[in-house]
Image (tube, helix red, strand yellow):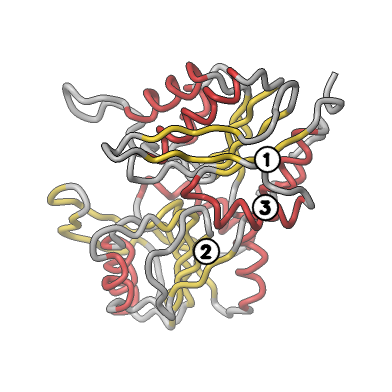
């Protein structure tokens, strides 16, 4: 049947800045959807055009506040009730992804709850990018297209033309990602070992590997308070690194993140536009994922393979 079904792309409020770029690269106009805000804080969403029988793509990152997730859920529900043929959620940043398991007694698994809500709302497919934990794909009993910012970051790393390059992981959990980058670039890898006093607070850190006389690039999936990242950069610089840069897909950047980055030994921090920046500082550079997502939407719509999207 489809691609005979017409394609329509809509955006949630928080991701309009990115959706407009995606619309430009895909050559398709964004559909008309309206958010209605009420005085008590409630809101509703309403499609302002027919989507009956359409292949509908809904773009919305689900970073805090929780209204962003709720708005997406209501968009999905509205699309299903308006007789959309297929509903695809495009979530560049999948919120709650760090809550992927029970790491202590009597806690929720937020990522599974979010997956269940999206499924119950009625999505037919999910497009997302650099999940904090790959196994979250298994929380869905429907197709998940998991994109990687490496297809954007790796060409940029090469364009920097850095000698004596070393790829670093800010913690043991990111060693697989860092190792993949290092293998692709054929350069060494180092790992930062850290211990936490409590959530978002690093008490001790040391570098496993040699960074003396090296240009270091730390790779990660997200930057939250930037405490770990800043401390890692400072430690590496103190151990003789020539320069320290960072690349992370999702700029959560909460709390004192901007100050931490500004006051650290980091020369540059490269992020994507999966989440909008709330401040502009010279050290942070944004690489857009709009073209990557636009191309993926087209390939999904026309039932084409997206495997050539992945450099690694």
Name the residue beneath numbered marker 2.
Answer: 188
Front-most of residues 275 and 84: 84
Question: What's the CA distance linking mark 2 and mark 3?
Answer: 35 Å
Give residue 22's mark: 3
> Which tag, 1 or 3, sits closer to the chain's start?
1
Is disc 1 surrounded by few (<14), some (14 to 19) or many (20+) residues within 10 Å? many
* Circle 1 or circle 2, nearest the eye: 1
Rendering quarter of residue 101: top left
Left or right of 63, for residue 48: right
Is disc 2 surrounded by few (<14), some (14 to 19) or many (20+) residues within 10 Å? some
Residue for point 31% across, 70% down: 258
Name the residue beneath numbered marker 1.
Answer: 9
Callouts 2 and 3 close, C-beta under 8 Å: no
Compared to residue 209, the image places residue 85 above or below, namely above
Residue for point 72% across, 47% down: 309
Q: Secondary structure at mark 1?
A: strand
Residue for point 58% across, 65% down: 287
Front-most of residues 115 and 201: 115
Is disc 3 surrounded by few (<14), some (14 to 19) or many (20+) residues within 10 Å? many
> Which tag, 1 or 2, sits closer to the chain's start?
1
Residue 22 coordinates in the image, percent (x, y)? 67, 52
Q: Secondary structure at mark 2?
A: loop
> Which tag, 2 or 3, sits closer to the chain's start?
3
Question: What's the CA distance linking mark 1 and mark 3?
Answer: 9 Å
């Amino acid at each position: 049947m489809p691609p005979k079904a017409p394609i329509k792309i809509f955006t949630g409020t928080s991701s309009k800045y990115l959706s407009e770029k995606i619309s430009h690269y895909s050559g398709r106009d964004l559909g008309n959807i309206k958010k209605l805000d009420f005085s008590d804080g409630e809101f509703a969403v309403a499609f302002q055009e027919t989507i009956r029988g359409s292949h509908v793509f809904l773009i919305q990152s689900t970073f805090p506040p929780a209204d962003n997730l709720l708005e997406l859920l209501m968009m999905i529900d509205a699309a299903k009730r308006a007789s959309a043929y297929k509903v695809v959620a495009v979530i560049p940043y999948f919120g709650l992804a760090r809550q992927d398991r029970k790491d202590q007694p009597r806690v929720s698994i937020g990522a599974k709850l979010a997956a269940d809500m999206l499924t119950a709302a009625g999505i037919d497919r999910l497009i997302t990018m650099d999940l904090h934990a790959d196994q979250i794909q298994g929380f869905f009993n429907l197709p998940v297209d998991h994109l990687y910012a490496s297809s954007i970051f790796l060409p940029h790393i090469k364009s920097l033309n850095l000698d004596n390059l070393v790829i670093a992981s800010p913690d043991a959990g990111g060693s697989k990602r860092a190792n993949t980058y290092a293998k692709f670039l054929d350069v060494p890898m180092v790992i930062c070992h850290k211990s936490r006093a409590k959530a978002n607070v690093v008490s001790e850190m040391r570098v496993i590997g040699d960074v003396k006389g090296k240009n270091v690039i730390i790779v990660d999936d997200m930057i939250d308070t930037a405490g770990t990242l800043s401390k890692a950069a400072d430690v590496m610089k103190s151990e003789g690194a020539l320069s320290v840069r960072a690349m992370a897909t999702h700029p959560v950047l909460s709390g004192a993140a901007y100050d931490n980055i500004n006051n650290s030994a980091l020369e540059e921090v490269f992020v994507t536009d999966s989440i909008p920046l709330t401040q502009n500082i010279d050290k942070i550079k944004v690489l857009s994922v709009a073209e990557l997502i636009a191309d993926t939407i087209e390939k999904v719509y026309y039932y084409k393979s997206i495997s050539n999207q992945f450099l690694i």
